[in-house]
Image (tube, rainbow, N blue to C red):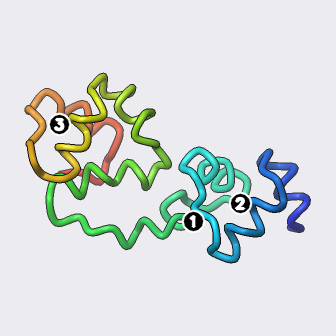
């Protein structure tokens, strides 16, 4: 697939894709989702998120990146504040059981 074809299929500009290919631009999760769909590969593969550590609950919650969720999108899904997500992802607080059940619906790689 040519760069112009990929740009047309994803709605991204060729410059953005070129900079991303050269590793000179951090691609946003929504753009990764679009690229993932067109290229037929996972968001985790495109973002190299498979290298994220997963030893703590907070690190596994960061796995929202595997699915291309931004913080805003993920807190909306969970109906929590960005501050709460930050505290969970940095292992400062542990989500209550009812929240962990909700998280598991979105991230099947959790415990």
Q: Are marks 1 and 3 in contact (CB under 8 Å)?
A: no
| Residue furthest top in the image | 79
Q: Is residue 23 left or right of residue 82?
A: right
Q: Nearer the viewer, residue 100 or 29?
A: 29
Q: Earlier in the sequence, mark 2 or mark 3?
A: 2
Residue 33 appears at what percent x and percent y? 60, 49
- Using the image, tell me which numbered label, if any, was put on residue 92: none
Q: Earlier in the sequence, mark 2 or mark 1?
A: 2
Q: Nearer the viewer, residue 61 or 39?
A: 61
Vertical placement of residue 75 versus 3, above or below: above
Q: Which residue is mark 1?
A: 46
| Residue furthest bottom in the image | 22
At mark 2, the secondary structure is helix
Q: Which residue is mark 3?
A: 100
Give me the residue at 10% from left, 48% from top.
92
- In whole angstroms, how far apart are the C-alphas of marks 1 and 3? 27 Å
At mark 1, the secondary structure is helix
Neighbour class for label 2 at 10 Å: few (<14), some, many (≥20)? some
- In whole angstroms, how far apart are the C-alphas of marks 2 and 3? 32 Å
Q: Nearer the viewer, residue 49 or 23?
A: 23
Q: Which residue is mark 2?
A: 39
Q: Earlier in the sequence, mark 1 or mark 3?
A: 1
């Amino acid at each position: 697939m040519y760069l112009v074809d990929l740009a047309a299929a994803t709605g991204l500009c060729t410059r953005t894709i070129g900079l991303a290919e050269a590793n000179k631009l951090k691609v946003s999760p929504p753009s990764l989702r679009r690229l993932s769909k067109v290229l037929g590969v996972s968001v985790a593969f495109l973002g190299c998120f498979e290298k994220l550590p997963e030893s703590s609950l907070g690190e596994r919650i960061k796995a929202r990146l595997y699915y291309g969720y931004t913080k805003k999108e993920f807190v909306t899904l969970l109906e929590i504040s960005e501050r709460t997500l930050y505290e969970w992802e940095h292992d400062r607080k542990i989500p209550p059981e009812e929240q962990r059940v909700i998280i598991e619906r979105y991230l099947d790689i959790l415990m």
